[in-house]
Amino acid sequence: MNHTHPTRRSFLKATLVAGVAPLFLPGRIWSAEVTPNNRIALGFIGIGIQSRGHLGRFLSNPGVQVLAVCDVDTTRREAAKKRTNDFYTKQADTAYKGCDAYNDFRELLARKDIDAVVVGTPDHWHAIVDIAAANAGKDIYAEKPLTETIHEAWSLVSAVRKNDRVFQVGSQQRSSREFHIACELARNGVIGKITHVSVGVGSPAKPCDLPEEAMEPGLDWDRWLGPAPMRPYNSILSPRGVHNHFPAWRNYREYGGGGVTDFGAHHFDIAHWGTGLDGENPIEVTPAPGDKDVRGVKFKFANGVVFEHAKEDGITFHGPGGMIYVNRGRFGLTVKGVDKGHLFTAEEAKTVQIGPILDAVEKEFLTDAPVKLYRSTDHKQDWLDAIRSRQKPICDVAIGANTVTTCHLLNLAYYHHEKLQWDNVTKNFAGGTGKPEWLTREYRGEWKV
């Protein structure tokens, strides 16, 4: 007997005409990897420029269905809703109106038909939304840095573990080949025991001093501020509508941690990974020499490894046998004085292909290497695979908490110009250093962690 299976478009069209939202569809319609009744229903919370990129990637993934979007800006959320409905309409060749839009993230989280959420809010909202999502039983893909404070980071880990959720931090460099190879080289002792890591990221944040601007209709400014102090509107914090740039709210302490927590959430993550320190933070933090210096803080770990906040961009691992440099699209390796890979500058990256360099290094040093790190080539797909397997993804919540703790300790050293000691067990200051209030922040209104 001949069996004719429907195409993706014909099945979607049939279900839409019947008024049925295609939430869980037979796996053969989408791909061999997606099993029956295993299509993941997604909601998006925060639809800025970063999340718009995420939305496009997930819409094109046959293993998911986007059911809802949420943003405090009317224009942004309606644009995301239309984009989603238009995408599925084109797929099914018939009108689709199954994506809903919300101003309050709690309404989206209350929906029982949503399995997982993608969170792309400003940093000062991360912990509150992510903890609420975990408590609502949702799996989570959340933008970095994980949280606005150290207290929030470990509170979030507790909530994720308590609710047995799969949480992927958007530190996607772990899914890029150059970073994976650099860390395997470091972990396998190709340049000997790592003694020092230079991490080049931006400067700390500063208190917000922006002037008041006239409010425009369509933005829920009180909800944009949320747990942060009330202040007049300024478009630098929340540009109206569907903008095509990254807003500068992260430059201000009330909403982020400056370049330290921005790219620091990427580069310090790699520094931890390459030294095997995913489960540890520095036991000692030494401020930069001058009060106005925004580079030069040093971290000492229990095993003697030192991290330094450096001026040079990227991550450089130093050992007695050489150095390993890595950045996005760039890579360098020197072993016992011999240059094994040279692609250090952005200018070089315009003309030199990184692939052959990585191929040669991998073949020479890693073919039979004893240490093999978790391998992911697609950060978002890795999260979806982990949701189905119920295993931890490549950048689990505890990894994100560890990284953001190091970043916050770095900022605290700049903010207070004091030497700090840290207890990795209690997640608190040690040796009479620091103050408890530095681990948290004041919350406005109903929002608390």
Image: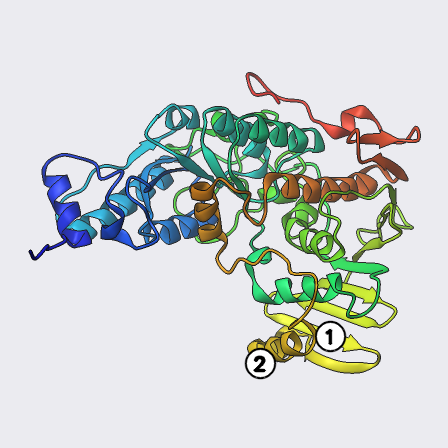
Q: How many marks?
A: 2
| SS class, disc 1 | strand
Percent from the top left, x then y, of residue 10?
Answer: 13, 51
The vertical placement of 100 against 360, above or below, is above
Q: Is residue 243 visible?
A: no
239 lies left or right of 152: left
> Which of 417 and 171 lies nearest the eye of the viewer?
171
Residue found farthest to the front: 1
Q: Is residue 369 above or below residue 170?
A: below
Q: Residue at x 72, y 80 (%)?
A: 340
Q: Which residue is mark 2?
A: 356
**Residue neighbourhood size for the residue with mark 1, other residues' Cα within 10 Å, grouped as few (<14), some (14–19), many (≥20):** many
Type of the residue with mark 1: Leu
What amino acid type should be assigned to the residue bearing mark 2?
Pro
Identify residue for label 1.
Answer: 333
Left or right position of 21 against 412: left
Q: Is residue 239 shown left or right of residue 328?
A: left
Label 1 or label 2, whichever comes before in sequence order: 1
Between the C-alphas of marks 1 and 2, the distance is: 14 Å
Please indicate, yes or no, whether residue 70 appears anywhere in the rendered image: yes
Quadrant including the N terminus: bottom left
Percent from the top left, x then y, of residue 26? 24, 45
Given residues 302 and 151, the one toward you in this image is 302
Residue count near mark 2 (Cα–Cα under 10 Å), binned few <14, some 14–19, many ≥20: few
Residue at the extreme left of the image, as rendered? 1
What residue sits 68% from the left and 33% below the top? 149
